[in-house]
Amino acid sequence: MTATTAGWGVELQGVTQRFGDVVALDDVSLTVRPGTITGLLGRNGSGKSTLGSLLAAFRRPTAGRVLVDGEEPWENERVVPGVCFVRESGDVLDDFSIKDNLAYVSGARPTFSHELAGELLDLFELDPKRKPGKFSRGKKSAFGIVLGLASRAPLTILDEVHLGLDAPSRYAFYDALLADYAAHPRTIVLSSHLIGEIERLVEDVVVLDRGRVLVAQDAETLRAEGVSVTGPAAAVEAFVAGREVLATQRLGGTTQATVRGGVAEGDVRRARQDGLELGPVPLQDLFVHLTDPQRATHVGGAR
Ligand SMILES: Nc1ncnc2c1ncn2[C@@H]1O[C@H](COP(=O)(O)OP(=O)(O)OP(=O)(O)O)[C@@H](O)[C@H]1O
């Protein structure tokens, strides 16, 4: 592994993970492209953390194959140091100072950047002399983010790492992630329930639903699954009549509706004449719609 690697790809082939009677992942086949940021989405209990734990070789799947950079990560001395899985729970040494934690983690990560770690500690106002055991939830999350980003691992999985962070800290995290990813491309899998916030970061999207892959697609193609229509309420209502409406928001006399499916050129002209604005569909609306328990629709499907 070199310090300048552009990221590792991931392939899951028919992966099933059981915990007793619970099937956390059910015959999952999936590809994560190297050098991309993939949003890993899914409702509670859909299998996101389980997927991360398999990539990080915390466990072996019940069935199927997990490949990271072409090899199974389980007990793999080449692959394991290149996979950084940061969980909401932290996985830090609570009773040791931040400085000691950094020394410990950097010893195991050939790509670790002390310079970036220092910048991020400043950004999140974390004192290197303090011990994470005494931190608030948000500060603990922030320290997890410091370790995750500064590791610059060729495969970084950030699982709900924003929990407890206030909004300014979350946006600082998103900006830091994007800036360092641009300077040091690698593969990042980002799991979050705040889809609206991470939407601008993700290039590919995987949606898990009850342990199965519901969507695995690039974000742009996914957004083309629908369109948002904004304008005067009556004009929006007339435009969306007969279409599948995924979500509607009203603010005063203005309505924004998200509809499924593309729009023809004639529709674009008509929208312009009626004073309507057409835009990309918010991923959040698609996600809520697709994972609605009443539905069984599959979009795109596993790559
Ligand atoms: N170690 C375990 N032992 C038993 N069951 C488990 C274990 N880990 C996960 N599960 C179960 O597997 C399923 C998937 O859990 P997982 O944590 O992967 O979901 P998730 O998508 O990360 O959920 P959330 O968004 O709530 O964090 C759940 O039913 C969960 O209860």
Image (cartoon, rainbow, N blue to C red):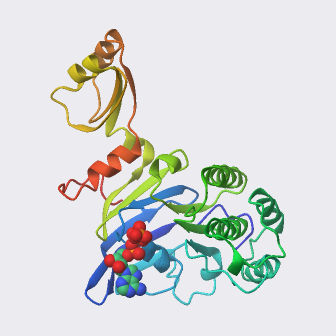
Q: Position of residue 18 (x, y in %)?
A: 32, 85
Viewer-proximal residue, 150 or 294?
A: 294
| Visible residue check, residue 41 | yes
Viewer-proximal residue, 292 or 165?
A: 165
Viewer-proximal residue, 69 or 174?
A: 174
Residue occupying the point 78% across, 76% down: 98
Q: Position of residue 205 (x, y in %)?
A: 43, 54
Is 265 positioned to the left or the right of 141 in the image? left
Residue occupying the point 32% across, 16% down: 271
81 over 145 or under it: above or below = below
Q: Quadrant of residue 230?
A: top left
Q: Quadrant of residue 136?
A: bottom right
Is 38 positioned to the left or the right of 93 in the image? left
116 over 230 or under it: above or below = below
Q: Residue furthest top?
A: 273
Q: Quadrant of ligand 1?
A: bottom left
20 over 33 or under it: above or below = below
Is 227 positioned to the left or the right of 53 in the image? left
Is 269 positioned to the left or the right of 115 in the image? left
Q: Residue furthest left?
A: 242
Question: How many discs mark residues in the rendered view?
Answer: 0
| Visible residue check, residue 61 | no
Q: Position of residue 275 (x, y in %)?
A: 36, 13
Quadrant (top left/top right/bottom left/bottom right) for the C terminus: bottom left
Q: Quadrant of residue 163?
A: bottom right
Residue occupying the point 61% across, 76% down: 90
Viewer-proximal residue, 250 or 104?
A: 250
Quadrant (top left/top right/bottom left/bottom right) for the N terminus: bottom right
Q: Position of residue 218 (x, y in %)?
A: 43, 49
